[in-house]
Amino acid sequence: MSNLDVLFSPYRLNSLALPNRVVMAPMSRYVCRDGVPTAEVAAYYRRRAENGVGLIITEGTGIDRPAALNEPGMPRFHGAAALAGWKKVVDEVHAAGGRIAPQLAHVGQKRSNTHPDWTPSASYESPSGLSMTGEQVGRPMSEADIADTIDAFARAAAGAERLGFDGVELLGNHNYLINQFFWDQQNLRDDRYGGPTLLERSRFAVEILKAVRSAVSSGFPVILRLSQWKPKDVTARIAETPRALEQWLGLLAEAGADAFHFSQMKFWDPAFPEVDEELNLAGWAKKLTGRTAITVGAVGLSGDVNESFAGRSARSVPLDGLLARLERGEFDLVAVGRALLQDPAWLEKVRQGRVDDITDFTPAAFAALS
Ligand SMILES: Cc1cc2nc3c(=O)[nH]c(=O)nc-3n(C[C@H](O)[C@H](O)[C@H](O)COP(=O)(O)O)c2cc1C
């Protein structure tokens, strides 16, 4: 393996000093009880911190809206019991020398993957009440709902800083609520939160970013996670061209995003192959905005996450291609999902060159909290 030094070089994300470039990707585990992270959850994150992960981003955790979550095992990020559970998580990660940011989530109209019959305590809410395929599945949010949701994101971010978290990430990807506002097929609103252009449909995200930014201190990192793809359409694009991407991200950067975490299936897939055969989405984000860019997608593995969800294993593979891109400065940070799910010591093994000790990813890891 070449150029490992670049992976273990420090980086500053706003005022947060990171010892290396590796971020644990947010991964829902659905094991919380009544929305409260358990001691097992705290120990699970602690193990990744003990093994040197630079920054842990937690599984999606619900802001204070009645329909923010779509799974019974997802954690909440409000209420005394859930926040006490999160405080234990932060303290354990810090005790092990790590850093951690919650992924603040509202799922919009997206239904449960694992419990189709489970429903939140209020009806699903979304920009126009439409599913990805255009059926009316819920109610459009009123302006009052929108205002309270923006405020709930800000309250959660302020709470995260108070609890001692090292930053926050906003779930703006994968067809969850913020993402649904961006999408012209799901946001048909004719008020100021909708409109024919992506910039008009970005107002909801812009107002969330501004509210979050003013609720936390200026040095506190605010990461926005985005994706072009949708769960049912991996070829979907929200920004059709680099120019559209530049205008979109420019607006979001100006509103307060310190970093863009661009979800894609495989980090080596070019975002606009018709223009550049190499540059991935994080690469474009960095080039167009100069903000911190986090890449993700099959790092250290031969196959993507959808293949694993379909039950297939993925081989452990060398990091050379990733390291070459990192060294060229295409992006700043690298998020790792399944490799760190499979093995909490993955990064430490990489650092020590113990590649033979790194096992392949098997879907059995989805069921474990090891
Ligand atoms: C079990 C599991 C749960 C996930 N949950 C979330 C989540 O809560 N929020 C999110 O933005 N992405 C989620 N993802 C996507 C990952 O953050 C990541 O983008 C994806 O797994 C690709 O990275 P990988 O190829 O390194 O696994 C999840 C992925 C997995 C495997």
Image (cartoon, helix red, strand yellow):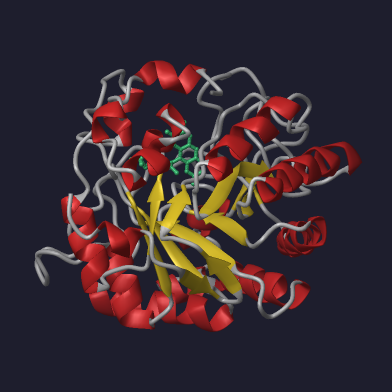
Q: Nearer the viewer, residue 6 or 151?
A: 6
Quadrant containing the C terminus is top right
Q: Quadrant of residue 158?
A: bottom right
Residue 217, placed above or below residue 356: below
Q: Nearer the viewer, residue 72 or 108?
A: 72
Q: Nearer the viewer, residue 61 or 331?
A: 331
Residue at 11 percent across and 72 percent down: it is 275
In this view, the residue farthest toward the right is 80
Measured as percent of width and height from the top left, residue 79 is found at: 87, 43
Residue 68, placed above or below residue 32: below
In this view, the residue farthest toward the front is 352
Q: Quadrant of residue 242?
A: bottom left
Measured as percent of width and height from the top left, residue 123 is found at: 71, 36
Q: Image quadrant of ligand 1?
A: top left
Res. 47 in view: yes
Residue at 31 percent across and 21 percent down: it is 310
Residue at 61 percent across and 76 percent down: it is 15
Residue 336, placed above or below residue 189: above
Q: Is residue 352 left or right of residue 104?
A: left
Res. 133 in view: no
